[in-house]
Image (spheres, coloured by chain):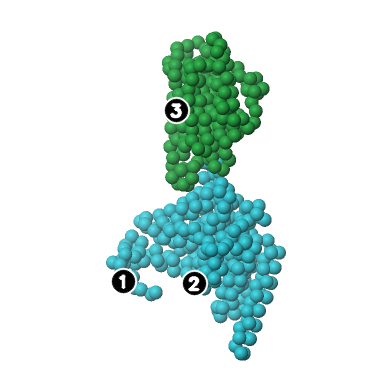
Chain colours: A cyan, B green
Amino acid sequence: MASSGAGYDLSASTFSPDGRIFQVEYASKAVENAGTVIGIKASNGIVLGVSKPLLHKMVVPSTCSYKRIHSVDEHAGIASTGFLPDARQLVGRAIDEAANWEDQYGVKVPPDVLADRLGYFMHYYTLSGGLRPFGASCVIGAYDQDTKQYKLHMVEPNGSAASYYGVATGKGKQAAKTELEKLNLHKEPCTVDEAVQHIAKILTMLHQENKDNEGKPLEMELSWICEASKYKHVGVPKARIAEVKAWVQEQLEEEDDDEEEAMEE
Amino acid sequence: MMHSAESQNLKDGEVSTGTTIIAIPFQGGVVVGADSRTSTGSYVAVRTSDKIACLSDHIYACRSGSAADTQALTDYIRYYLQQLKIETGRPARVKSAAHLLQKLVYQNKDNLSAGMIVAGWDPVEGPAIYSIALGGTCLKVPFAFSGSGSLYITGLLDSEFRENMSKEEARALVKKALAHAMARDGSSGGIIRTVAITAEGNDRDYTSELPYGPVSY
């Protein structure tokens, strides 16, 4: 989709003749070139996952440095992709919004309000003079304490926010979306344990399919909100991640074997 | 001139709702009640005032202290709760109303004289009652009573209050307690106003027939 801006793309304050604002679209491109993020709303929780292929040997592989999933409040977390420093700013804003809300109203910010506020903020940067849009998308997983429901939202560089059963963004979003649709989450939600497995599997598959990643280990960041985490946004426990990684390996090997058998026939 | 707790903080000529206000919960709701006397010193400025302010569909506030201060406060909270409903799409929680009021009172404590009770029903918690005292203390309480006349009925309420009353029992207790307070407190009097707040709706009433008083019924 390489259309020429032809002079209408120099500023976020300019519409093109066919009604597009190219600068905002280019901001989405920044997201499309970055690591994949997947979120799933399960029947009993939310899981967020980010693929962090190790860039090069000298980067310390841990979830402390170069963190991609952040907690916004006890009950909410954001997994982001795109320009990571831009994403960090957005997370900071979300933290302020959540803290302010609790200070004013004495209750935790409802997930849809948090998403709307973040969308409003991101949108402001698409039409204020001198500012550029954020080159990042945020996937927000949160627990609504009043209605006792889990909510998954995504906010994009143009400021639009929507609620999802399952969402993917970043480099592998097309393939990930196809896999998510196969899961039929909108008809029948999975459990939070299944969601962890699904996300880990999709991220691993995408990583392996990309030949550029030959030899580069995949690091995944996974977080969840569920009864086991006492309804707080925390990282999926390391033991569980190790289990799931082993499970994914088995699954992928089985599928490879099935494919080989199919071809031999 | 009566040196009640309120009049010491009032400016010259400022009007006080030297008052008795009460909130008693029942199965599925809350009954709030108040007397109707607004006084400037020993002059009764208004005999039939309404000290029960509606903050939102299912949340009310009872006002005691300076009439001007409490009216301004309830106007602000009503506005904030309206905005909150638009932004969240759901009815406000009684907790949020109380929290907002607490913030306003605490941050302006030097300039305000307001003792209020916030009571109502919300879909999350059901019936809830919060008492907000002069300095901005906000306490969630099983039942609340406040104002200059409340001192005279502490024993009565402590001994007669029961959990899980019916709406009629709660209303009767509210009226009885207010009548006793109005009999002894010069700053409380007039008629008894009550509002019963439930999920289905609110039921406002008043009576000039006091269950207790100089003439017994």
Q: Position of residue A38 (x, y in %)?
A: 55, 65
Residue type, label 2: Gln
Q: Which residue is mark 3?
A: B71
The foreground one among A137 and B132 is: B132
Q: Is residue A160 left or right of residue A61?
A: left
Indicate the position of residue B9 as horizontal and vertical percent values: 51, 20
Residue B132 showing in the rendered view: no
Residue at left offset 40%, top offset 54%: A124
Callouts 3 and 1 on one subunit: no
**In this rendering, does residue A28 appear at all?**
yes
Are the residues at dot 2 and dot 3 in contact (C-beta closer than 8 Å)? no
Residue A81 lies, in percent from the top left, at 52, 64
Instruction: Say few, some or many: other residues with alpha carbon within 10 Å of mark 3 (under 14 / 14 to 19 / 20 or more).
Output: some
Query: In terms of secondary structure, where does tag 3 sit?
Result: helix
The residue where tag 2 is placed is: A174
Three-letter amino acid code at disc 3? Gln
Residue at horizontal 57 percent and vertical 66 percent from the top: A50
Q: CA distance from mark 1 to mark 2?
A: 28 Å
Q: Secondary structure at mark 1?
A: loop
Q: Choose the circle earlier in sequence order: 1 or 2.
A: 1
* Image marks 3 and 1: residues in contact by CB distance under 8 Å: no
Identify which residue is drawn at 45% across, 12% down. Answer: B43
Q: Nearer the viewer, mark 3 or mark 1?
A: 3
Q: SS at mark 2?
A: helix
Q: Chain of mark 2?
A: A
Q: What is the distance, in whole Å, between disc 3 and disc 1 at their CAs?
A: 60 Å
Q: x, y (%) of residue B198?
A: 52, 35
Instruction: Provide the residue designation for mark 1.
Output: A6
